[in-house]
Image (cartoon, rainbow, N blue to C red):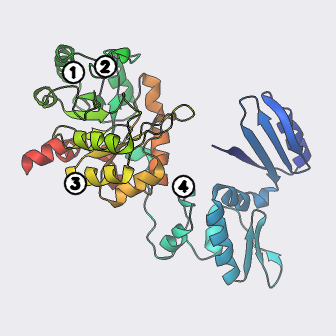
Amino acid sequence: MGDLDIIVGSDDAPAVIQAFVGLPGVAQVLAQGREKASVVLSQGLQVDLLVVRDHQFAAALHHFTGSKEHNIAMRELAKSLGLRISEHGIMDEKTQAWLPVATEDDVFRAVGLPYIPPELREDGSELAAAKSSHLPRLVEMQDIRGDLHVHSTWSDGRHTILEMAEAARARGYDYIAIADHSRSLGVAGGLSPEELVAQIEEIRQLNRRWDDFRILAGAEVDILPDGTLDYDDELLSRLDVVVASVHSAMNQDRETMTQRIIAAMRNPYVDIIGHPTGRVLGWRDPYEVDVERLIAAAAETGTALEINASPERLDLKDVHARMAKDAGVWLAVNTDAHRMEGLEQMHYGVTTARRGWLEKGHVLNCLPLEELLRNLKRHRRREA
């Protein structure tokens, strides 16, 4: 993230500016004017504030939620219609009169377009999609039916399987997949094969509690440096869902890493590749991997790719999620939650999915339980 823009609608701009620069946590005031101010917070983040009149707020909101390319495309379209559009509003160039703009809908309506969600205001291609009525009906939080990658106290989670399940059920989910770490990740308390078998049995027993909810027995299985998996196929076949992830040897060269992950995709029991590029925002860059080849292999093998909703990861990122969607690859939006509160981070993943132009029909865990199970790779292969 570069900087943070804040827009405030007020008729008393100086008072808002003064309150803003005096906030706790402001380490430095870079600029301060009547309607604008820029500060640096103690964490090093620059925050810019613009105060506009209430009647200008919708136009300003549209301007600052759009990329440079989106705003240029909007200005060119407006100009072709005899209008001038900016963060201050929309003006009729012939009469020099300001058009009434109360909402962002009014901004788009003025140039003959339907509403374009903020997540799509990127490169200008969204205007063409809007003109031709091809904007996607973006996935929403209420479309999510479950979470296919969460942890428990069996590995490095903070809460028990039952606690994680009850928290998911309280959110209105139909299912949750317990995907604790495998044995090679000892630092995270990875499960031995014997422990995984015992966990599967615990899950089967717990599922007797509900008629409207199901815990799926899963695992987050390490993809070892040579592309093999941390458990054998016989054990993997006992699970409902398998997430395969890289947690070691992240300094491999691009070709080796790419082949490593593709090898895991070719396993018939690997349903999802977890956090496919391995990035941890602010701490670790993605490992060297050819994402386009991963997407092609995912399409070929029927393997889903994860959008990891943890705000530290957001992996896949939006651009790659859109590429995967266009290739016909399922995406699974999962939290990778290690505690009950982590389930609340699902909205970060949904936002990333929306930025990738995903509809609910592209997201694996928007499916009802039985349909989900039918669409996991292991079951599709069996039916074939």
Decide which of tag 4 and tag 2 comes sooner along the chain.
Answer: 4
Q: Amino acid at mark 4?
A: Glu
Tell us which disc is closer to us: 4 or 1: 4
Relative side of 116 to 276, left or right:
right
Percent position (x, y) of residue 42? 75, 28
Which amino acid does the dot numbered 3 rest on? Glu
Instruction: Please tell me in which quadrant of the rendered image residue 365 appears.
Output: top left
The CA distance from mark 2 to mark 1 is 8 Å
Image height of 246 relative to 30, above or below: above
In the displayed structure, 299 sits above or below 86; it is: above
Element class at badge 2: helix
Tell me the number on the disc at residue 300: 3
- Asked if marks 2 and 3 touch (Cβ < 8 Å), the reply is no
Give the residue at mark 1. 203
Task: Classify residue 226 as left or right of residue 341.
Answer: left
Residue 268 appears in the figure = yes
| Disc 1 to disc 3, C-alpha distance | 32 Å
Dot placed on the residue nearer the N-terminal end, 4 or 1: 4
280 or 258, which is in the foreground? Answer: 258
